[in-house]
Amino acid sequence: PLWDRSALAVRLSVVIPTLGRPTLERALASCATADEIVVVHDTAKGGGSIPPLPPNAVYVEGCWGITGGHGGRQEGIRRATGTHLAFFDDDDEYVPGAIELMREAACDVPVIFRMDDPLHGVIWKEPEIKWANVSTQMYVVPNIPSKLGSWTPHMPGLPCPGGDFTFIKETVENFGDVIWREEVISVIRPPSLSISIVTPWQNHMELAHDYSYAINCRRGTDEVLVVDNASAHPIPLAI
């Protein structure tokens, strides 16, 4: 049976682990209409600044030192009071209307929406729980701690490679079912208007990483301007 709204209204808690990056403010704005926002500030790497939090936010501070926000997510789950949980990173954004859509879809089994990744396109590709086909920002799960999977650091290549994959795999197994939704609810690290100016690295090896990243990935870059620095042996551009 689906969630009985006549017995208990859906309350959506969004868990956001953060290092205090500037993008947190935009992430918070995109989920402002959630019933509860659990902001878990990990100060293991020094900690950045936290913008003013809305009235529906719960602030938690700790020092986990675990990559990928997994320790913070686990703590956020423990602190969340909503009937259902959603998960987010501090450099991602929900699309307009996503919170209302998740609240409407919440039921007694996990729900997996779709997301837009600038590098890999929209996922899920097929309604299947497999590595690189599911991600943190896509889930809405009932807040029943005994049925939630473990959120551990990423270990690619192993049978249970950790992170968001292992969490949702175990959670679906524990609940015994899952609902797949076609709607895109989030954008991963949404690009902002930018122009990158990059120089070939023939005589400047310190620029090699930036040049290669801009030419090959172009994430968040609307235009790439390559300045010829009169290197002794010009390098052909990988356009």
Image (cartoon, rainbow, N blue to C red):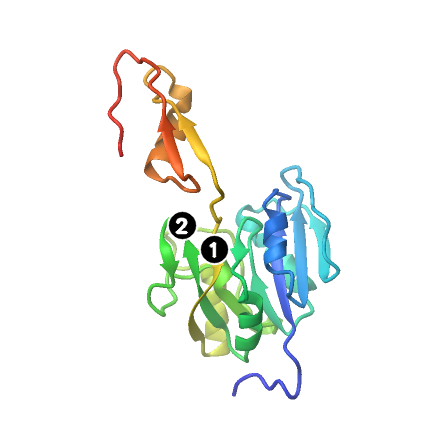
Quadrant assignment, res 200: top left
Residue at 37%, 25% (x, y): give it. Answer: 208
Residue at 73%, 49% (x, y): give it. Answer: 52
**Along the viewing direction, whichever of 141 and 158 lies nearer the viewer:** 141
Q: In this picture, is 53 found above or below 204?
A: below
Q: In this picture, is 52 found above or below 226?
A: below
Kindly check if marks 1 and 2 are in contact, taking CB atoms under 8 A apart as contact: yes
- The 10 Å Cα crowd at callout 2, few under 14, some 14 to 19, many 20 or more, is some
Q: Which residue is mark 2?
A: 118
Residue at 38%, 63% (x, y): give it. Answer: 124
Q: Position of residue 79 (x, y in %)?
A: 69, 63
Q: Position of residue 58 (x, y in %)?
A: 72, 59
Seen in the image, is 67 located left or right of residue 77?
left
Q: Position of residue 206 (x, y in %)?
A: 42, 21
Kindly identify which numbered label has been placed on residue 187: 1
- Residue type of the residue flagged with mark 2: Pro
Q: In this picture, is 175 found above or below 64?
A: below
**Along the viewing direction, whichever of 70 and 22 lies nearer the viewer:** 22
Q: Position of residue 44 (x, y in %)?
A: 64, 41
Residue at 55%, 66% (x, y): give it. Answer: 97
- The 10 Å Cα crowd at callout 1, few under 14, some 14 to 19, many 20 or more, is many
Q: Quadrant of the C terminus?
A: top left
In 3D space, how far apart are the residues under numbered discs 1 and 2 (Cα atoms)? 8 Å
- Residue type of the residue flagged with mark 1: Val
Q: Secondary structure at mark 1?
A: strand
